[in-house]
Image: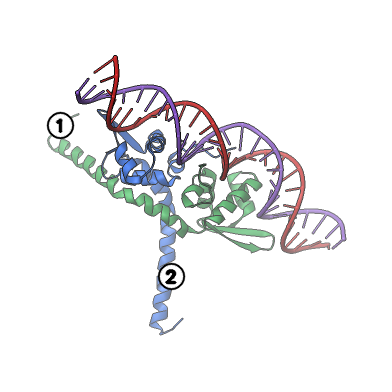
Chain colours: A green, B blue, C purple, D red
DNA sequence: TTGACATATTCCTATTAGGGAATATAATTC
DNA sequence: GAATTATATTCCCTAATAGGAATATGTCAA
């Protein structure tokens, strides 16, 4: 079985670094394709293809205005990714707390190394 | 240019759903490969291959004990993913706040629909 | 209609993946 | 050493890229 399609879900869609850049670029405000091309210095056909993938998984929305297509990030679509990563957040927080406590105990007892 | 290797970074490694399952399974405690095979009902060679990918990007750590290999999730390695997704968190929080406020205004004025 | 501009699609190609089956390696036990 | 258990690696195969170049589609203006 080959690798899952980039359009299969959000996790596969954001595997590509260019697409992640695009999403950040379109998070604050909608922008036409040409703006993305200029900002990320990527060939226009390449940008259009990435946008197609992002549209397929619902990570961006489009609006036409004359000949321009305004894209914007659908931030809510990133939530499944955030929620999944958050599963582990408490573990590393605990880990960091333990490291911190150990460091503080050492300081209190005047230990070095 | 083909797609980036699954071992190129955390984002590509977690694109596969099996690997995400494995990471969750190994988050609470370390487990031998056989345990993962039984829990996820995936062929053993397949599990070993996924673990290899996860090891390459630092998402899991291994420890040998006799003939068993105990793997555990390195939760801190998931942080780059969490941090990236968190960029968008404030945007959807604002969005949700706006939706909530609108709903409350409607309720106050006795509006329906 | 013609031309200019903005964006999308198609074609091509090298590379990668992931499952299954078979086999290899490593550690333990007898 | 031989058999057993646990895990890793290799081989085969098909499907899916992502970029580059060329081309198509769509919209507006004169």
User: Residue A110 sits in which quadrant?
Assistant: top left
Task: Work out which quarter of the rendered image holds the C terminus of chain A and state it.
Answer: top left
Which one is in front in this view, the residue at disc 1 or the one at disc 2? 2
| Residue positioned 58% across, 49% down in the render | A50
Q: Chain of mark 2?
A: B
Q: From the viewer's perspective, tell me whether residue A30 is left or right of residue B103.
A: right
Q: Residue at x 15, y 39 (%)?
A: A105
Q: Which residue is mark 2?
A: B99
Tag 1 near tag 2, CB within 8 Å: no
Position in image of residue A47 (x %, y %): 61, 48
Query: Could you say which is closer to the camera, residue A17 or residue A65?
Result: A17
| Residue B104 image position (x, y, % from top left) | 39, 76
Q: Position of residue B26 (x, y in %)?
A: 30, 43
**Image position of B23 with respect to C30: above or below:** below
Q: In the structure shown, which secondary structural element does the residue marked by tag 2 occupy? A: helix
Q: Distance from label 1 to label 2 (Cα)?
A: 54 Å
Residue highlighted by disc 1:
A111
Say left or right for B88 vs B38.
right
Residue depicted at 39% across the width and 39% down the height: B43
Discs 1 and 2 share one subunit: no
Q: Secondary structure at mark 1?
A: loop
Circle number at residue B23: none
| Residue C5 x, y percent position in the rendering | 73, 54
């Amino acid at each position: 079985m080959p690798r899952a399609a980039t359009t299969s879900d959000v996790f596969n869609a954001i595997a590509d670094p260019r697409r992640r850049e695009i999403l950040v670029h379109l998070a604050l405000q909608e922008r036409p394709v040409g703006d993305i091309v200029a900002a990320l210095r990527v060939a226009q056909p390449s940008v259009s293809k990435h946008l197609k993938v992002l549209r397929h998984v619902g990570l961006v929305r489009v609006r036409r205005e004359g000949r321009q297509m305004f894209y914007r990030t659908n931030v809510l679509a990133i939530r499944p990714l955030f929620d999944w990563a958050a599963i582990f957040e408490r573990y590393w927080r605990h880990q960091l707390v333990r490291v911190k406590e150990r460091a503080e105990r050492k300081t209190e007892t005047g230990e070095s190394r």
